[in-house]
Amino acid sequence: MKRAGVIINSQRQYDSLSQYPYIFNFYKEFPQEEIGITEFETFALDRLNLLKDIENASLSSNGKSLVENSKLYELMKKYLPLNTIGDGAKMSLEDLFYQRRKDYLSHYILKLAYCSTEQLRIWFIKQESDLFRLRWHRCKDQNMKKEFIKSLNLNMTELSGEEKEELKEELLETSYLDNNFKNKDQYIQAFESDTYYKIPFEQVTDLVQQRKIYIKGGVAYLPSKEQISLLLNQYKENLNKSMEKMSQNLTKKEDDERIDPLIINLSQQYVEDDYILSNGNDIKYQEIPGLVRYFPLCMKNLHEHLTFDNHLRHGGRMQYGLFLKGIGVSMDESLKFWRKMFNKMTDDQFQKGYAYNIRHSYGKEGKRTNYSPYSCSKIIMGNAPSTGDHHGCPFRHASLDTLTKMLRKSNIKENHVTEICNYAKEHHYQLACTKMLEYVSGINNEYLENINHPNRYFDQCYPNSEYNKNKKLNSTNQQDKQMDDLMDSSY
Ligand code: SF4
C-alpha cells in the first residue's frame, strides 16, 4: 500500500492501533519501514519547528510553567497533532494511526540528526522532554496514562488502601505542600482520591531534593500527580543512552547520498540563524571602543583580548570581524580598525597575512560570498576555544570563575551575577545572555527579544541602532495614529 510516497507494509493493521497504542512513547524500537524522501523531510521539519517553538516559549517563560502556555498546545496541534479515541475530534483509526506514525518517525529522524555531538544531544533531549511533559499534561485519558506506565515495566507498585491509611499523616505532610487548597477539607479530599506508588527513591532524586515526597526505608511514596517526574527522568535517561549509541553507530554507517545532506541540514537548521545585515549604521573605526559596552559578552571578551595582545587568532578574528560588519562597520573602516589594533606588525605583514581575509569576509575576494555574522548557536556549538583562543561563548565555554569575573567587570550586581551564572550552569546560555542584556541595558524584559544572535544583542542594547530607531518610529507612528483616531472620533 502506498500513501504520500511511502511504501507501507501491506500486512499492517491500523484498525487496532496495535503498533502505536498510546500517544506517549519512549521510542525504544528503531522503525523498520520505508519512507519517501519528501515525507522524511516534512516530518522532520514539522517536529523541528515545534521543538524550536517550545524552546522559545521556555526561554521567554520567566519562570512560569510551560504547561500553562496555551499557545504551545495550538502549535502541537499544527505540527504534530495526536488525538485519542473519544476526545471529541472524531478521527478515524486510520488517521490516528498516521498521526502516531508521524510522531514516531519524526522523532527518529531528528534523533539521527541531533545525536552526533553532546551539545546537539543536550538540546534535543531538553526540548523532547518538554514536549513529553506538555502531552502528558494535555491528555485527559487517565486510562491511557495508566496503561502506558504499566507498559514501561517500571519498578513501581501501587499502595494499598490500608498502607495509605497507615501513612496518611506523613503523606499529607509532604505531598501537597505546593498546592493552594481553599480549606482543609479540600486538601483531605484530594489526598483521598489520589493513587500512591512505591518506588526506589533513587529514581526520583529531584523530588527527594525538593522534599516533595515521603521516603521511608529507601522507598519513595509517589502521588500520581508527581508521576511525570519519574517518567521524565526515565525518558531522558533512555534518550541519552540511545542517542550516544546511535552516534557511535553513525561513524560506522555507509554513506547515503540522499539522506546525509538532509540530516546535516537538519542539525544546521538549529545551528544557523542568519542575521540580516543592516544597511543603516555607518560606524567609523574610531567609534568602536566607545561602543564595546553595548556588545554581548562574547564580543566584549574578544575586544578586550585584541586590545591587550594586539592580536587575535583566526577563530576570534572571524567571530569578531563578522560581528563588526553586522553592526555597520564598512570594509574600509574594518581594514583601518584591524590595522590599528595589529600595531605590532609591519604594514607589509598586515597586507599579506590579514587584509585579504578581511576583504574576503566582505565578499570582495575569492568566491565573493557575502558572509553573515555568526549566530549564537553557531558560536555555542562550534569548536571550543583552546589555549590562546578567545572565540566562543563565555556562558558556554568559560569556567564559572572566569564568567563571574567577566560579569562583575560589566558592573552587574552580585545577586544578578549569581542568577546569570545559574542559567549558564543549567546550559541555558542564551537565556543567561538575555538576562545580562536586561541588567546592562535596564530595559524591562517584557520589551526584550531573546538573544539568538550577538548582533541582536547589540541592536537592542545600543540606543542609536537602526533597530531601536525603527522601534521608536513605529511607536511614534502608532501614537500619531491613535491621536488621529481620537481626533476623528471627537468630531
Ligand atoms: S549567548 Fe550569543 S551573544 Fe550571548 S555571549 Fe553567547 S554567543 Fe555571544
Image (cartoon, helix red, strand yellow):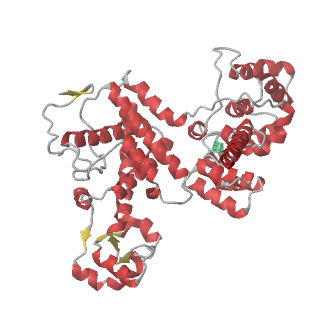
- Which residue is most to the front? 491
Q: Residue furthest top?
A: 366
Residue displayed at 76% across by 52% down? 410
User: Is residue 223 positioned above or below 87 on the image?
Assistant: below
123 displayed left or right of 466: left
**Residue 218 shows up from this direction:** yes
Quarter of image, res 228: bottom left
Q: Image point 44% across, 44% down: which residue?
A: 51
Which image quadrant shows ligand 1?
top right
Q: Nearer the viewer, residue 210 or 349?
A: 210
Q: Position of residue 231 (x, y in %)?
A: 34, 58
Q: Is residue 162 left or right of residue 48?
A: left
- The foreground one among 213 and 247 is 213
Q: Position of residue 367 (x, y in %)?
A: 63, 14
Q: Quadrant of residue 172?
A: bottom left
Q: Is residue 235 above or below residue 155?
A: above
Which residue corresponds to the image point at 39% horizontal and 75% vertical from the top-left? 175
Give the quadrant of residue 96: top left
On the image, the x and y values in percent for residue 108 come to: 34, 39
Quadrant where the N terminus sits is top left
> Residue 396 location, x and y as percent?
60, 47
Left or right, 197 with reference to 441: left
Looking at the image, is 477 positioned above or below residue 350?
A: below
Q: Does residue 399 appear in the picture of this structure? A: no
Which residue is at a point 45% across and 48% down the rendered structure image? 127
